[in-house]
Image: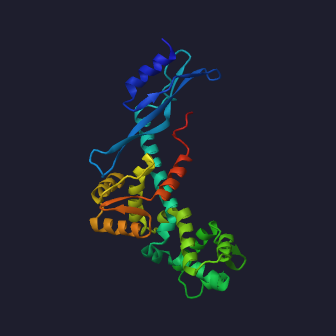
Amino acid sequence: MDAAVIMSRFADREYGQNIFVDPPIFDEKSKLYHSNIRSKIPVFIYDDRSSADYKIRVLKIDSLGSIYINDKLELMPQLTTYRDKCYENLDNLLALWRQTIENIVVTSSSDQFAHIYAFTNHFGQIELIIENLIEHGEIKHDDLRKGMHVHARNKLKRYLNLLEGLQLVRTVEDGYKSGNYLVELLSKDMSPEDRWVAILSYVIRNRYLTLKKVFEITILDKTISIDNIIYFPEINVKEAVYQRKSTIAENYKYRYNKNINPLHLTRCLRRLEKVDAISREGSNYFGRDDLRETMIQRIESEPPLSIHPL
């Protein structure tokens, strides 16, 4: 009996379907056989143009863990990934994959989100900073102390730090001035409205998760989630996938484990359609070709899903 047979028998007992074990490799230094555990998860994509129209794509996961045996063909339990840990790794990697796609949807559609009027009212602190830098060229420390409560002052400072990290603001001895990126935007022939959209898009594209988790700006969440539901299957099949409202609602519940009110769903879809973030044909919604292509290019540049072996 050789190492391959030992590992194959262990895998048959320990793991379920969709999990595979690579042929073992012997390491002369450690005197151990190592076999990588990987997986292939089928992804079913349905298109509402036809009830029978669906596609299957396979999500490849390069590594979920490892099996180790010694040169006496004995299993090394302390180094081996057992079933429970293997499936925990699988759940974590699938969650990471879904989050990666959502991040790509956000960064690819930030220009469209910045045009949604209802959102702009929730970025008043950023607008306050930018408008004062444009008007006066600087914000002095004294400006933050005059007629401003401590809580409001600290909140504004957090936004200044956020914008400094994006080179929209830079710190000077007595306060703040325009950062390199803001100076670059101001040098361009742009209307104030276009400049504000460009700034807001830039902030959403680069700091969406920070805005959501640190600054608790959640006004974008439902609309971004619906946009993600539209593009998620399309990124997988690399073409348009038509979805009715009922399908979008079902996929939303499956993806986020909660229902969406039909009135809110209609508003989100209307917002996305108005700013050309998505397309519509009759009762079906689907993604834009140019945005989808950008998302596909970005997801293909992501590293493979894997848990690195010891």
Nearer-the-camera pick, 233 or 37: 233
Say whether residue 214 is visible. Answer: no
Q: Nearer the viewer, residue 227 or 12?
A: 227
Residue at far right of view? 173
Q: Residue at x 48, y 67 (%)?
A: 112
In this rendering, position of residue 120 left or right of residue 170: left
Q: Position of residue 282 (x, y in %)?
A: 31, 62
The residue under the point 44% across, 66% down is: 276
- Residue 105 position, x and y percent, is 47, 57
Residue 120 lies, in percent from the top left, at 47, 75
Q: Quadrant of residue 166?
A: bottom right
Q: Residue at x 59, y 87 (%)?
A: 146
Q: Position of residue 158 (x, y in %)?
A: 57, 71
Q: Is residue 170 above or below residue 33?
A: below
Q: Is residue 258 above or below residue 193?
A: above
The residue depicted at 48 percent of the width and 31 percent of the height is 37
Extreme-top residue of the structure = 1
